[in-house]
Amino acid sequence: MAETVAVRPGPEGSREPGGSAYFAYEERPRVLEGLRAYGLIVGMWVRSTMAYRASFVMTTFGNLAATAFDFLTIVLMFTHVDALGGYTLPEVALLYGVSATAFGLCDLLLGSMERLGRRVRDGTLDTLLVRPVPVLAQVAADRFALRRIGRILQGLAVLVYALATLDIAWTPLKVAMLPVMVISGAAVFGAVFVAGAAFQFVAQDASQVQSAFTYGGATLLQYPPTIFAKDLVRGVTFVVPLAFVSWLPTLYVLDRDYPLDLPQWVAFLAPVVAVAVGALAGLAWRAALRTYRSTGS
Amino acid sequence: MRLYAVVAAGGFRRYATYRTATAAGVFTNTVFGFILAYTYIALWDARPQLGGYDMAQALAYVWIGQGLLAACAMMGGGFEDELMERIRTGDIAVDLYRPADLQLWWLAGDLGRAAFQLIGRGVVPMLAGALAFDIALPGSAWIWPAFLLSVLLGVVVSFAVRYLVALSAFWLLDGAGATQMAWLLGLFFSGMLLPLPLFPGLLGEVARMLPWSSLLQIPADVYLGKHTGWGLVEAYAFQGGWAVALLLAGRLLQSVATRRVVVQGG
Amino acid sequence: MLDTSVGAAGEGTGVGHDGFITLDGVEKVFQVRRKAGLLRRERHEVRAVDGISFQVARGEMVGYIGPNGAGKSTTIKMLTGILTPSGGRLRVAGIDPSRERTRLAHRIGVVFGQRTTLWWDLPLRDSYRLMHRMYRIPDRRYQENLDRCVELLDLGELLDVPVRQLSLGQRMRGDIAAALLHDPEVLYLDEPTIGLDVISKAKVRQFLKELNAERGTTVLLTTHDLTDIEQLCRRVMVIDHGRLMYDGSLAGLHEVGESERMLVVDLERELPAISLESEGAGPLARVVKVEGPRQWLAFPASASAAPLVARIAAEYPLMDLSVREPDIEAVIARMYEAAAP
């Protein structure tokens, strides 16, 4: 063994008795470190999934079907009416497609964060805290489920159907709005996931509350704002800014009136709002993790 | 019989201890109830008397659905994950040596769970719905016990379906796929997303014949006074028939599966 | 250039406590809410760790024992940076664990006995590859460390087996290897031999011994198995109710705790209770139980079994014998009795 010790590379540490770290610790940007670790762990989960190929195919199909049933319900509604809250089927389909794609994207990337409470309860969160990478990245990548891609595919299919059917007076701004609203939408949902996970440090069994905002929010946004009570619309716009996910930008694309007499330009605030709620959720996460580490509960 | 009563009581108590989870679930059911209620209002505004329901009945339907969602385990959350885990880890071999019938054992536990979730997760959303919206109430007092009996039969059908799904873990290494497919079918064909009378043509006819209609559509119709006299007996017979057929199918699958365990040596 | 002095330092009892791990009056207080009446909840404090101070030198191997709920794992969690202490000062390799958790993570290895960190559905090798990249271990180092662990922990045939198919002992060996690929200076082991069969236990112990001797890795282990301590640790710390009750050698602990080992003797035939008088010092052992040809003799754990066995073999028709170790709870319980006025 003497030889192997002798070839130990690295700076000062190598000569110290007891085999101090042979490579110096470098402070790296936490965001990049987090993304790298996220990628590594996701890779492991994807490989794990492939150990059960048949189940993977079934669940991917299941995810696709899940949202398909969702949309089928809307189609069935439109067999009885021509318009819902003044919106035609293709218009509702656009709302649906944007909301489903944005939510699907977020669900794929962060969907397992709702399991955090379980990890806190059974103590396995501790095994993540002794790793040299950010905990948030590890929790976000935990149980990454590639099958959730089914939801995105279905959302995109409905989106394409809507765009093909609708007669939209396209402008460059409207074209630009499409990817922007899907991505900022996913970011707003992501913030809800992170904040929800932070809440689970406090109430470990409360993952259902998170579903109310995530799944509930995604469902709400699939319908036109005109059918909901004013207070509900106000809440989702100003309290949990889910409205920015799809309602306002989609209404802009459709040249429809905004709810609550909001001015036209607020649709462009979507990315700003996404970044802001993301930052807030990040702060909530840090505070929650700190509390966990000092209370150990 | 006493044994199963104890198991059922245990199932009740076990779920009763998850207070935060129950409160969180009630919150979620209520939020979904509101969203669904508004879409139904838009629908019935455009088409009053759609599917034979008036607005108040449609709204009652929404909140009955939210009230029964947990009790009928329409989105999972019952015993099936645990049973599948026991099959996966091989602990099931231990259960087979217990001096109790495997299926009845789990059924008893699940009925206990359902009883708790009917009270813990069902009552509050229904009250919230009744306060926030103008929902139809039963025409007479006897409707309540009739409704509860129909719910009980619905829970048994739901159990029987989930038992079959859980046993699939003997053959599929990872049961997540089968579970997910089952609850998707359940949600859609129970009438949770849209009442079955609104399903058009053949789809509607098929949907009304499938076992899942026992979970929500039939109990809701009993509540709304759609089944009376012989109609009520027929509704019960439909639910009971599916319950017996599916429980027997479960026993059959169970005996095939246990033979497998014995052959593999546990 | 293997630094043999390190091994020697680890083996010597008179280690200079230069404080590689230093705890100075460390406390951890939890707020627990208990139900008091129907709705009222009462807050009260639980002092899980109540002012613990000790130092561990680089290259030491220390057993950290105590009953369940004594504060062992809370201490380990503070040492690894998982929990923030409520008071006192704590340093590991000069780092404040709770403030620089990620930096410390590169220098420590942790094995949680009951919770595997390996990937259930993937071959063992894949879990190691993740460590390789997550800790940014240079390729060559990684390969060397892996080869070494594979050799010493006998993992060669297991590398391509999915973890779910490994036995408990194999998995534990796999977990220990996973914790060492990044060359940690400190290794924390939480019940590393719990539930393992005799052969696996021996393998794990042998490996830890060699690791400590060759690499000078500082090892802190919690265990319920006194044999672990006996074979690995020169130094034992006993913690109970959040306080350090004992810090010294295992022999010393046995003395303090007046603990006894049990010699189980099978004679050729049924005989009256064995009686062995030694000159002046009273009996070498006392017979606790006789059952047919089998007899149970208790003797002080701090004494060697050899002279006792020699005497019995000389004076009685001996067929077979075995020695049973005292259990930790009993030793600690007696320690209390001894300490009580």
Image: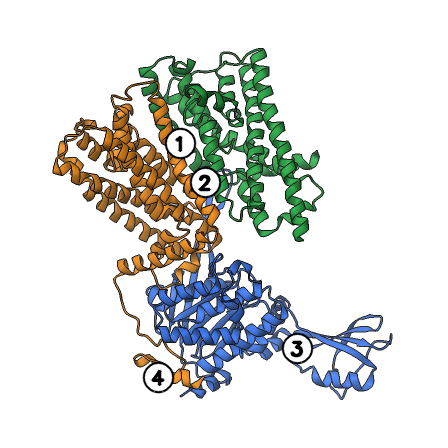
Chain colours: A orange, B green, C blue
Residue A15's label in the rendered image is 4
Mark 1–mark 3 distance (CA, rounded to whole Å): 71 Å
Q: Name the kind of residue labelled 4 in the image.
A: Arg
Q: Chain of mark 1?
A: A
Mark 2–mark 3 distance (CA, rounded to whole Å): 51 Å
Q: Chain of mark 3?
A: C
Q: Name the kind of residue labelled 2 in the image.
A: Thr
The residue drawn where x is 36% and y is 69% is C106
Mark 1–mark 2 distance (CA, rounded to whole Å): 30 Å
Q: Which residue is mark 3?
A: C301
Q: Is residue A77 above or below residue C67?
A: above
**Dot 4 and dot 2 within a common chain:** no
CB of mark 2 within 8 Å of CB of mark 3? Answer: no
Q: Name the kind of residue labelled 3 in the image.
A: Ala
Q: Name the spot of residue B30 as percent of width and height, x first.
A: 40, 30
CB of mark 3 within 8 Å of CB of mark 4? Answer: no
Mark 4–mark 2 distance (CA, rounded to whole Å): 55 Å
Q: Which residue is mark 1?
A: A69
Q: Residues within 10 Å of mark 3 (few under 14, many from 20)?
A: many
Upstream in sequence: badge 4 or badge 1: 4
Q: Secondary structure at mark 2?
A: helix
